[in-house]
Image (tube, grey):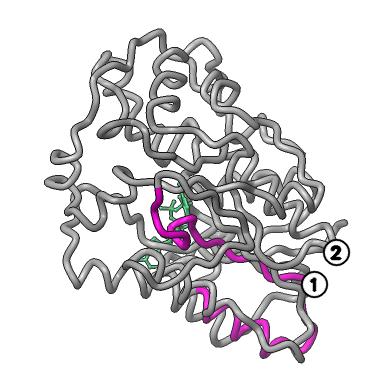
Amino acid sequence: MAGKTVVIGGGSGFIGTALSNLLRHCGYDVVVVSRVPGAFNTTWSDLEHNGLPKNTTAVVSLAGQNILDFKRKWNSGFQQTVRASRINTTSSLARAIEEAEIKPNVFVSISGVGYYPPDPIKEYTEYSAGGKDDYFAELCTDWEQSAKLPAEVGVRQVTIRSGVVLGRRGGMIAQLYFPFFFGMGGPVGSGQQYLPWIHLHDIARLFLHAIENQQVEGVLNGVSPNPTTSKEFARAFGSSLWRPALIPLPEFVCNILLGPERARMLTQGQKVIPKRTLESGFVYKYPDIRSACREFSPLIYTDDLDRENISR
Ligand SMILES: NC(=O)c1ccc[n+]([C@@H]2O[C@H](COP(=O)([O-])OP(=O)(O)OC[C@H]3O[C@@H](n4cnc5c(N)ncnc54)[C@H](OP(=O)(O)O)[C@@H]3O)[C@@H](O)[C@H]2O)c1
């Protein structure tokens, strides 16, 4: 294994840090492509000028401006940033692969379940049509397209359509921890809408599964196999903190805070099934919301759960 390098665009973030830890634990070298130069980083312009490092066995695309940043107004400028931060970075990685003399084995890129239009009943698998129905469906379609390599390049490709990633130190759990801890948490709106989710360790393990298994190809839904509503999530998270989680966040408040279009990510949902993911042989460590949320209990505090505990 020594000497095998995985290049991760956006590897400095929430998912990227967990994936880097897991890959290093499994004997890989990791090079992060970032906007910021650093000891284990390369920048996007270095990548453009110097190409992929020697011994690159896999390339992963994870960069993207945080969409649910409450401090940023949902205007056309911010929408452009959200789009460019995903599509330009993913295209740069694809270009670097095309130009590499010695090709990596695999290119794994992330996308979102926003690819599927929100619907209260419909079940979506990887085989379902997504599309161009709204801003997020169009964003995901174009994002996935930007990762596509011509067949003659001969590199295996995997796209992971991720649900909300639940981890102790980032993403949605970090944002909700204190409201729930102080007993002010609850479902969003009616709470009946689905909230496709996956535990941080499982999404990192799913990337590793895609990197290491030659037979894995195409789209995999990165969501838990047990669909969960917003109300079920709130109950499970509340009970892991011994809190009631009864106070709903009204839809109109979400609309005011995020703008109605962006708020749909929380107020409406999709029932997403990881059919191909399961068929590919992936085994979840956290298949249900109770087992995932149990980890966020203050009693299970370890020095750095995400850093030390993550394993195959
Ligand atoms: N977290 C989730 O629940 C979730 C769910 C579905 C899909 N995803 C997608 O998965 C990817 C990784 O998620 P994450 O939660 O790990 O994200 P994150 O921590 O917010 O950010 C990932 C990295 O993207 C880079 N980045 C941020 N803004 C950028 C910009 N304007 N231009 C270029 N690069 C930028 C940053 O790297 P540098 O600062 O080092 O440049 C950052 O470390 C994202 O594309 C996200 O949309 C996440």
Task: Answer above or below: position of 222 versus 238.
Answer: below
Residue 75, disc: none
Mark-to-mark CA distance, 1 and 2: 9 Å
Q: Can you say which quadrant of the picture contains the N terminus?
A: bottom right
Is disc 1 in contact with disc 2, using a CB cutoff of under 8 Å? yes
Give how far across and how far down residue 128 sits, in percent. 58, 62
Residue type, label 2: Gln
In terms of image quadrants, where is residue 135? Answer: bottom left
Give how far across and how far down residue 223 sits, in percent. 58, 45
Q: Residue furthest front?
A: 121
Reading the image, the residue beneath label 2 is 214
Ligand 1 shown in quarter: bottom left
Residue depicted at 62% across the width and 65% down the height: 159
The answer to whether the beta carbon of the residue marked 1 is less than 8 Å from any atom of ligand 1 is no
> Of 164 and 58, which appears nearest the observer?
164
> Of 39 and 231, which appears nearest the observer?
231
Task: Answer above or below: position of 256 versus 288.
Answer: below
Q: Neighbour class for label 1 at 10 Å: few (<14), some, many (≥20)?
A: some
Mark 1 / mark 2, whichever is N-terminal: 1
Give how far across and how far down residue 297 sits, in percent. 49, 16
| 212 sits left or right of 267 in the view | right
| 86 sits left or right of 106 in the view | left
Residue 105, disc: 1
> Of 92 and 189, which appears nearest the observer?
189
Give how far across and how far down residue 226 sits, in percent. 60, 34
Residue depicted at 60% across the width and 28% down the height: 288
Q: Which residues are magenta?
A: 90-119
Residue depicted at 52% across the width and 79% down the height: 146
